[in-house]
Image (cartoon, grey):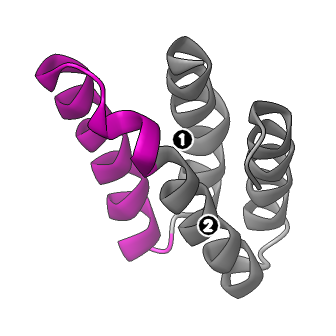
Amino acid sequence: MTTPAAVITQALRCADLFRLGRDIEAALIMVELIDAAMPPMTARSPADQHAFGQVLNTLLNCQERQDWIGVADGLEFEFLPFLNSLL
C-alpha cells in the first residue's frame, strides 16, 4: 500500500468495514493506513504533524469507546482529506 490511490482505497474500505461492525478486520487495516501515513509526516511542518496527531487522537478515542461509526466517519471525513492535503 504505497501509492496514494491505494491508501485512499484502503481507507474507504476500512471505513466501510467499521460501519459493518467488522472492527477487528478494520482495525488491522487502520494500522497499515497509519503506518503508510507516517513516513510522509516526518517531512512535514510541526503544525502539520500536530494536526495529524489530532486526527489520530480522534480516531483512537472513537476506537477506544468502540464507536465504530465515529471511527469510520473520522477515517472518511478527517483522515482522508488530511492525507489528500499531503499528497
Q: Quadrant of residue 49?
A: top left
Q: Quadrant of residue 12?
A: top right
Tell me, for residue 47, which label it has, or none.
none
Please state the extent of the stretch shown in magenta in the rendering: 38-66
Query: Magenta region's main secondary structure?
Result: helix
The residue lying at 50 percent from left, 19 percent from top is 86
Residue 16: x and y in percent read 84, 55
Label tally: 2
The residue lying at 85 percent from left, 67 percent from top is 20
Residue that mark 2 sits on: 32
Query: Which residue lies most toward the left here?
Result: 46
Relative to 15, 43 lies left or right: left
Rendered view: 61 above or below 39: below
Residue that mark 1 sits on: 74
Task: Please name the amino acid that badge 2 sits on.
Answer: Glu
Tell whether position 49 is magenta. Answer: yes
The residue lying at 56 percent from left, 28 percent from top is 83
25 vs 72, nearest the viewer: 25
Q: Quadrant of residue 30?
A: bottom right
31 vs 12, nearest the viewer: 31
The residue lying at 50 percent from left, 23 percent from top is 82
Relative to 74, 24 lies left or right: right
Q: Secondary structure at mark 1?
A: helix
Judged by depth in the image, the label closer to the viewer, 1 or 2, is 2
Residue 3: x and y in percent read 78, 39
Rendered view: 67 above or below 23: above
Rendered view: 15 above or below 42: below
Query: Which residue lies most toward the top here?
Result: 85
